[in-house]
Image (spheres, grey):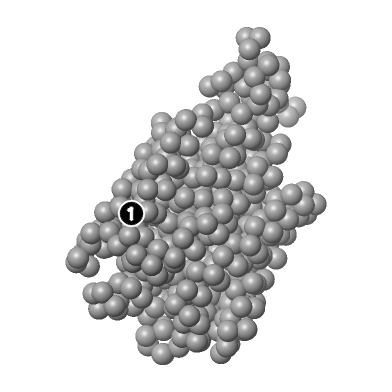
Amino acid sequence: MAREHTRPFLGPRIVAVAFASLTGAFGLNLAYGQFFAPLTRQFGWGLDVLSGTVAVNMIVWGLMQPVMGRLIDVFGPRTVMTANAALMGVSFVLLAGVQQVWQFVLLAGVAAAIGFAGCSSMPASVLVARWHVRGRPQALARSSMGINAGQLLLLPLAGVLIAGPGWRAAFPVLGAVMLALVAPVIWFGSRDHPADVGQRPDGAPAAAAPPAAGARMGQALADGQFWLTSLSFAGCGYSLYMFTTHMPKFAVELGGSASVGGWLMALVAVCSAASMWASGQWAARRWGKRRPLIALHLVRAAGFAVLALADSIPLLVLGVVLFGVSSFPVIPLTTGVIADRFGAGAMGGILGSAWLLHQLAAGAGVFLGGLLRQATDSYAASFASGAVVLLVAAVLAATIREGRAADPAEAPTPAAKT
């Protein structure tokens, strides 16, 4: 027992593990747009096929979120995240050999999506939430900056590889990042619970009171606040993946080079990292999570309005900056709202259900973005639809009540009141 008291708190290491997992997972999953042009040249696949495959990816990812949440509740995030990081890596390695469109859909749209569902934001958030209570907003913000690191490191790497040795070389290199780096870091670096190593969340002393038990899934689904939060989050999904999938092609249509999309995504990462830090370290402490969420949705709506009107690279860059500032910080804030309300103990299935709605909306955004582009010969209608959806998301966010949900089982009996 003496060793347990002297052992350093592993919470910061857990944050670093979640950061690494998000770096690899998002770096790979946001790279698909850069493969559109070479795949079209190689096979003649149109935007409908390619954006449809990404839409399948989004939907499969969403459908798997409650499944992964349940697996995490049963087996723990460490095992689930490690196995799925490996699955995502294997899928990317195999993508180097595709010849038929069904192979691309199976690997990129299904297998990689399942892997991503099990090693990205939802499981990483559950892992971090189990280790941090008082410092949860800051811990989630720091770990979520791995999303930005993936954009900064792996998206330019994908672009360089595609422009150099080609897309068939780019896929296995990206897959190797997950197999050789991310999966081992998760397995050897993390533990499911502080209790597994004789510790408590936030490094509290052993005499501290245990954290409140997590809510039941049925309790969450019967709570109107769960639906308001999740539907607001769905607006994030609709706009987020419409942007990341279609913006690189839009940039080329405005006269940018073939590599400009990757560099603009790097700009998104820089803006998002700054906003992530500010929202987690400062705004959430001062104003809570609801007000920053409203502000982020409104700023992103303004960014989409600019993109709908953009007819030049400078206007595109303005829209990219507004999107970057308001993009990924929504994830840790929403995760924090749900964790605070329902507790970290049963976060897997509950948060997974919120992510299901997010990803169904994401699939719709990716598909409708391509469909409207082909129907109107312009991205204006696509991005305008994103602005409208985000305004609705801001209204929904304004109705969120922060704090712990009341548990009917804890309600005082009539005898207790007298």
Nearer the observer, 150 or 131: 150
| Residue 211 percent coordinates (x, y) | 64, 29
> Could you tell whether 72 is left or right of 267 in the image?
left
Q: Residue at x 58, y 81 (%)?
A: 316
The quarter in which the N terminus is drawn is top right
Specify whether residue 227 is in view: no
Q: Quadrant of residue 79?
A: top left
Q: Quadrant of residue 319?
A: bottom right
Residue type highlighted by circle 1: Pro
Q: Residue at x 66, y 9 (%)?
A: 2
Nearer the observer, 3 or 167: 167
Nearer the observer, 380 or 288: 380
Q: Residues within 10 Å of mark 1 (few under 14, many from 20)?
A: some
| Residue 132 percent coordinates (x, y) | 64, 35
| Residue at the extreme front of the image, as rendered | 164
Specify whether residue 138 is in view: yes
| Residue 162 percent coordinates (x, y) | 38, 67
Nearer the observer, 358 or 399: 358
Q: Residue at x 70, y 53 (%)?
A: 277
| Residue 101 percent coordinates (x, y) | 22, 67
Identify residue for label 1: 172
Residue 382's place in the image compared with 214, above or below, is: below
